Image (cartoon, rainbow, N blue to C red):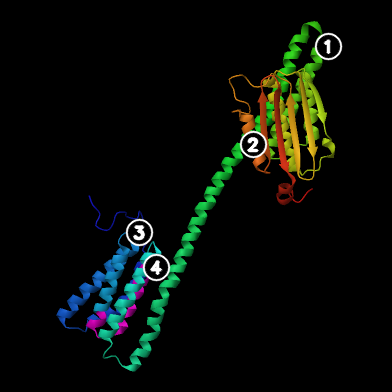
């Protein structure tokens, strides 16, 4: 069934515009003094005016057309009573104009309002005295200024509504980003620790028959590592999982030793001047790189290079494994770990390069520009 009032009906009507109908009491009382025929026509026109006003207030579709209709009906009252004072009925119309969805419609409505008001004044104001004009002009001036204030108020309210929507969207995106951060942290921290536990448990299994005392020591190391994992989980939950390069290098040495991979370190990580955020991100990148070395490289040696100059910080991890497979292009990785590193480095505008050549091993290099760090991370140099 079609809807004569428009394409969309509000679920709950706003009865606020009904309050302002009290100002129509002046034309209603004035009509009572007219001859019966003019009075009936006048009340019918007044009822049409009220219906048009409410329709345009409650429903957006056709609002401009109903506003123009009300301008014409207002002109009818002015000509009927030969009094331009009835132009004040257009205050209802200006409220309708302020609610128009586009600026083009608003200016079109204002143009029609000016034209119809000018015609009405020319026809109905010919017998108006000077004293009456003094009373009419101030409301008319307000009449033509009023819609701009209403429009400004409406735009401000719309902007606030859009701002609330934007804030809700930002909150939603922040939650998604936080979930991704937690996923990265769990992968980088617990993945590393669980890999170490796996290696040590395998080693303990091999030693339990031949060298039980060493197996017991490995089990103790597994217990200590599991406690450290529990601490890491708590730190992740509390958001205080800060790392340093030096601390991660100590963990790296332990896991590579357990995996039977020789480690060589170049540089002076203890002298690295970097804020906690940079230390944390570089530490997690190093952790993920070592995880890849242990799980995938099939190497027996790994070297870590750390340098700092006036422009950037550089962290490189190189292994002597067989490198990329023949049917896999060098530098291509779809691993979750490398993706997590890239996402983390974007926070400090760092870059990651990954190269793997058959027979020549794999190198992962991370660079963080100092200029960006000074601008965004508190000016620490």
Whichever of labels 3 and 2 marks the residue nearer the N terminus, that label is 3
Residue 92 colored in magenta in the image:
yes
Q: Nearer the viewer, mark 3 or mark 2?
A: 2
Vertical relation: 245 (above or below) 79: above
Q: Nearer the viewer, mark 4 or mark 2?
A: 2
Choose between 237 and 295: the one closer to the eye. 295
Disc 1 is placed on an element classified as helix
> In the rendered image, which quarter is residue 286 located in?
top right
Label 4 to label 3, Cα distance in Å? Answer: 19 Å
Label 1 with label 4: CB-CB less than 8 Å: no
User: What segment is highlighted magenta in the picture?
Assistant: 77-97
Residue 47: image location, x then y, percent: 24, 70
| Residue matched to label 2 | 342
In the rendered structure, which disc, 4 or 3, sits on the residue that comes first in sequence? 3
Which one is nearer the viewer's eye here, 214 or 13?
Answer: 214
Name the residue beneath numbered marker 1.
213
User: Which residue shows up at 72% across the image and 26% down it?
Assistant: 290
Reading the chain from its start, which is encountered first: label 1 or label 2? 1
> Disc 3 designates what residue?
13
Q: In this image, 186 relative to 84: left or right?
A: right
Q: Position of residue 256 (x, y in %)?
A: 77, 22
The answer to whether any part of residue 22 appears in the image is no
Does 244 lie within the magenta span? no
Mark 1 vs 2: CB contact within 8 A = no
Q: Is residue 358 above or below residue 77?
A: above
Question: Decide: marks 4, 2 in contact (CB < 8 A)?
Answer: no
Q: Quadrant of residue 244?
A: top right
């Amino acid at each position: 069934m079609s809807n004569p009032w428009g394409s969309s009906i509000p679920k709950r009507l706003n009865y606020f515009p009904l309050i302002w109908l009290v100002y129509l009491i002046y034309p209603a009382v004035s009509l009572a003094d007219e001859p019966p025929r003019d009075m009936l026509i006048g009340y019918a026109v007044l009822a049409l005016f009220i219906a048009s006003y409410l329709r345009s207030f409650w429903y957006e579709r056709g609002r401009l057309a109903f506003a123009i209709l009300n301008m014409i009906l207002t002109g009818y009252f002015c000509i009927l009573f030969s009094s331009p004072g009835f132009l004040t009925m257009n205050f209802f119309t200006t409220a309708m104009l302020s609610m128009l969805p586009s600026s083009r419609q608003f200016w079109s409505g204002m143009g029609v309002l000016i034209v119809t008001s000018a015609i009405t004044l020319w026809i109905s104001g010919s017998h108006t005295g000077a004293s009456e004009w003094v009373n009419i002009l101030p409301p008319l001036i307000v009449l033509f200024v009023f819609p701009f204030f209403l429009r400004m108020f409406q735009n401000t309210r719309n902007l606030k509504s859009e701002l609330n929507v934007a804030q809700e969207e930002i909150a939603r995106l922040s939650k998604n980003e936080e979930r991704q951060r937690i996923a990265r942290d769990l992968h980088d921290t617990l993945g590393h620790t669980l890999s170490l536990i796996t290696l040590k448990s395998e080693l303990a299994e091999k030693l339990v028959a031949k060298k039980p005392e060493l197996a017991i020591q490995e089990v103790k190391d597994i217990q200590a590592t599991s406690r450290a994992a529990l601490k890491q989980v708590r730190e992740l939950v509390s958001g205080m999982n800060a790392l340093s390069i030096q601390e991660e290098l100590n963990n790296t040495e332990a896991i590579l030793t357990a995996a039977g991979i020789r480690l060589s370190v170049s540089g002076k990580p203890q002298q690295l001047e970097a804020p906690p955020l940079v230390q944390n991100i570089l530490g997690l990148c190093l952790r993920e790189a070592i995880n890849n070395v242990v799980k995938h490289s099939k190497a027996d040696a790994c070297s870590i290079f750390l340098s700092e100059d006036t422009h950037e910080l550089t962290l490189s991890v190189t292994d002597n494994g067989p490198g990329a497979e023949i049917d896999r292009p060098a530098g291509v990785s779809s691993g979750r770990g490398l993706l997590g590193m890239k996402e983390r480095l974007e926070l400090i505008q760092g870059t990651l390069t990954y190269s793997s050549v058959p027979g020549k091993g794999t190198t992962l290099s991370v660079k963080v520009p100092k200029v960006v760090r000074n601008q965004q991370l508190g000016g620490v140099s």
